[in-house]
Image (cartoon, rainbow, N blue to C red):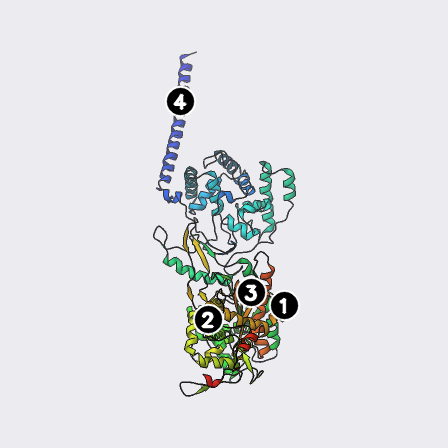
Amino acid sequence: MSTLETDNNIKKTSGYRKYIVLFWSLFAIGILLIVILFNLIAKGKLGYMPTFEELENPKSNLASEIYSIDDELLGKYYIENRTDVHYTDLDTNLVNALIATEDIRFYQHAGIDFKALARAIAGALTGQDRGGGSTITQQFAKLLFHRRPDSKIKTVVQKMKEWVIASQLEQRYSKEEIIAMYLNKFDFVNNAVGIKSAAKIYFNTSPDSLKLEESALLVGMLKNPSLYNPDRRPDTALYRRNTVLNQMLKYGFIDRELYDSVRQLPVDMSHFGRQDHLSGHATYFREYLRGELKKWCSEHFKPDGTAYDLYKDGLRIYTTIDSRLQQYAEEAVTEHLSQDLQPAFFKHWEGYTNAPFYFENNAREEINKIMNQAMRRSERYRKMKQADKPNDSILLSFNTPTAMRVFSWEGEIDTVMTPMDSIRYYKFFLRAGLMSVEPRTGYVKAYVGGINYKHFQYDQVTQGARQVGSTFKPFLYTLAMQNGLSPCTKFANIQPIIYLDNGDTWEPRNSSTKDLGTEITLKYALATSNNWISGWLIKRFSPQSVVKIARKMGVTSFLDPVPAIVLGSSDISLYELTGAMNTFVNKGVHIKPIFITRIEDKNGNVVETFVPEQNEAMSEETAYLMLELMKGVVDHGTGIRLKAKYKFENPIAGKTGTTNNHSDGWFMGLTPELSTGIWVGCEDRSAHFRSLSLGQGANMALPIWAIYMQKVYADTTINLSMEDFEPPLEPLSVEIDCDKYQAQQKSGRVIRDDEF
């Protein structure tokens, strides 16, 4: 070989070495730059990065959950409808579907799957879709700490941040924890944030009870929940679900036979139901509780010193409500009003110009006043006022035909009417309230604040107070029993005259002259709601004494101490009145009805427990004598239809109530294990039936109690007693057998007016 050739070879070899050195130098520099870049990213020098504390305790807004006493979920309060579950609460098919579809090597990598990443890059370079490169951990990191980039460079940096965060998450959590946290964090749309809410909203089940096809559908939504939303896009959701099933088949999680059978199933949305404060059971109760809980949160503090947040801190509120009783109560209200009372009310007012209002004088003027007040209370008026709209524009708006959805008992109606006409339309609807209390605990077992929370948000249990009519009379009769009278004590059935302090007189009127001038027992007088006997009693026991006993029994509303108080002229809430009547069943001890037993934090630690307030309002004997009196209402008085029509045979104590012009109908029904109060009436007192037969409490409210209790007694899982009330251990000081009592009255005298 010539010297020239040798020199050329040496030069070529030297040139190759330079290229090799240059290549590896550049490679090393690239690696160094990448290391530096990742180091800068990890230290937060290139934008936000989560701190160690944030990685250790990733924050999520957790919904606070409300549970019934029988452990049924009643509802939630939330910004995001999310409730965390543990890995052990996840169905096996759900986990397998997730791994097969999103990250088959999940258990082999440490947060970054380089094989999948290379495949994704190759696919991007060749223009072929070969699957994504993100692992489950990376997807979780993106959910936790994603900041939307606004340039391609920032997009690359964002992806590198996800790699760093994913690696850090893998160091701090087990694989199972990452799967659970990822599914807890994901938003499945339709107000379903997290797998627990998704399982409930889409399939009315829990994550550990999902069927294979349900698990596959939810996992399919992880790619794009809006695109694969089964409510709005069932066809695309079906396609994606079957893709997930195919992945499970491919990796051996299911066999061919199961795959072939399940993939043929349609997307079943029959159990789909959005969760919000307008739907579900106990809507009025949940809304009442919201106010109470917000106050509680403002007064109670977490270990870090900040006040609890009802919408973010994942509290678990355990209530006294029994979901079965609540369901039956709501059904009873709906059944009576929709099938019987409301149709009768519509028919009753058919063809009347002023319907449903009844005024003897100045009808047009009074109706206009009611309508204008209703307009000013409306949400439309409030918003327009806040927007500084002039009055003439507001009035024009209320009298302009508008498309709207209005309530009917057959379902919402799409219609066009003016807002003023819609106000008049809603004035026709009868409202109702029901509350049931467990006598010895004070636990509120059922709470129905109205007929439909979406359209009628005024709560008739705790928010509303109406005239109580004759349901007030038991307070007066309690004084009689306390002062040695017997249910069998007789009074002359004649009209009393009561002289008032100002020199005027007051003479109570009876709706019937039956038994005029005869001698009747207190039991019969209360059973028939006799006003004259109430007049005699108030002459003996002053109005101030009646107010005092009512206060002892839990009534806090204003009570005007005048003789007419005994006829129910005062406005009292259903909550107060039911709690007061429950005193008789609880052997004379008033127990303030309560709604919550305990509150737990998101970790299950009990933050507070609740016990009811109690006070002795009367003796056990007085309470028992009152029950004997009130049993007469059902046995042969104004509540007789419970036995005659509804065929109840067990002992029931009760009291009906009807106010002036039949504006309010009441019924208090007491059994040894359940005290229930019911009110029915229109929003305005001037809207009512024009006849006593239709507007009395026995027709408006009592049937709801009958339907409700029929359902309760029929449910063997509740096992409600049908026995009589338990008598006091000590012998009674008065005779309650009226035949024996009368035999004991040797003189045979009847208590008359001149004896007071």
Question: Which numbered disc, 2 or 1, marks the residue closer to the eye?
Answer: 1
Q: Amino acid at mark 1?
A: Lys
Q: CA distance from mark 1 to mark 3?
A: 16 Å
Q: Residues within 10 Å of mark 2 (few under 14, many from 20)?
A: some
Residue nearest the observer in this picture, 385 or 573: 573
For the N terminus, the image quarter is: top left
| Picture disc at residue 724 | 3
Mark 4 surroundings within 10 Å by alpha-carbon count, few (fewer than 14), some (14 through 19), many (20 or more) = few
Using the image as rendered, state which of residue 339 and residue 425 is in the foreground.
Answer: 339
> Nearer the viewer's eye, disc 1 or disc 3?
3
**Residue type, label 2:** Tyr
Identify residue for label 1: 647
Residue 222 x %, y %: 52, 46
Query: Mark on residue 381?
Result: 2
How far is the residue under mark 2 from the one under mark 4? 85 Å
Q: Is residue 182 depicted above or below 520 in this figure?
A: above
- Residue 571 vs residue 83, the one in the foreground: 571
Q: Which mark is residue 17?
A: 4
Quadrant of the frame with the C terminus: bottom left
From the viewer's perspective, is the residue at label 4 or at label 3 nearer?
3
